[in-house]
Image (spheres, grey):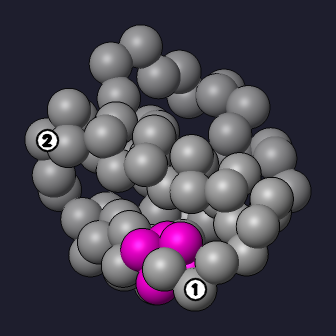
Amino acid sequence: MAHPAVLRNLIEQYETLKVLQAENGREEVRRRMDDLAYTLCVSTGTRDVDAALIAARHRLPGARPEDDSVLSA
């Protein structure tokens, strides 16, 4: 599992690019999102970006077992 600082950075990059992808859908944004999704999955031992985001958030300082990230769709 990656260091929490690395995970936080990956999460922030992915979420920022997700907004950009929704706004303009450029190819380079999609490719970078794919790269980040892959890195998140490898870093958390998951196979799906949503599961990777949840696992990464739970590794961050201050995460709680009842963190609402496990409840988001």
Task: Tell me which residue sits at (64%, 28%) in the image.
Answer: 67
Q: Position of residue 36 (x, y in %)?
A: 38, 69
The question of residue 14 being in magenta is answered with no
Quadrant of the snapshot with the N terminus: bottom left
Q: Position of residue 26 (x, y in %)?
A: 64, 78
Depth check, front residue: 14 or 26: 26
Task: Tell me which residue sits at (73%, 31%) in the image.
Answer: 68
Q: Earlier in the sequence, mark 2 or mark 1?
A: 2
Q: Is disc 1 surrounded by few (<14), some (14 to 19) or many (20+) residues within 10 Å?
A: few
- SS of the residue under disc 1: helix
Taking 47 as reference, is 45 above or below it? above
Range of magenta residues:
29-33
Quadrant of the snapshot with the C terminus: bottom right
Task: Tell me which residue sits at (73%, 75%) in the image.
Answer: 25
Q: Which mark is residue 15?
A: none
Distance between the Cα atoms at labels 2 and 1? 29 Å
Q: Which residue is mark 2?
A: 3
For the question of whether residue 45 can be seen, the reply is no
Taking 36 as reference, is 15 above or below it? above
Main secondary structure type of the part rendered in magenta: helix
Q: Amino acid at mark 2?
A: His
Depth check, front residue: 57 or 36: 36
Left or right: where 66 falls relative to 6 = right
Taking 46 as reference, is 17 above or below it? above
Taking 49 as reference, is 31 above or below it? below
Task: Tell me which residue sits at (36%, 79%) in the image.
Answer: 35
Q: Which mark is residue 27?
A: 1
Depth check, front residue: 64 or 52: 52
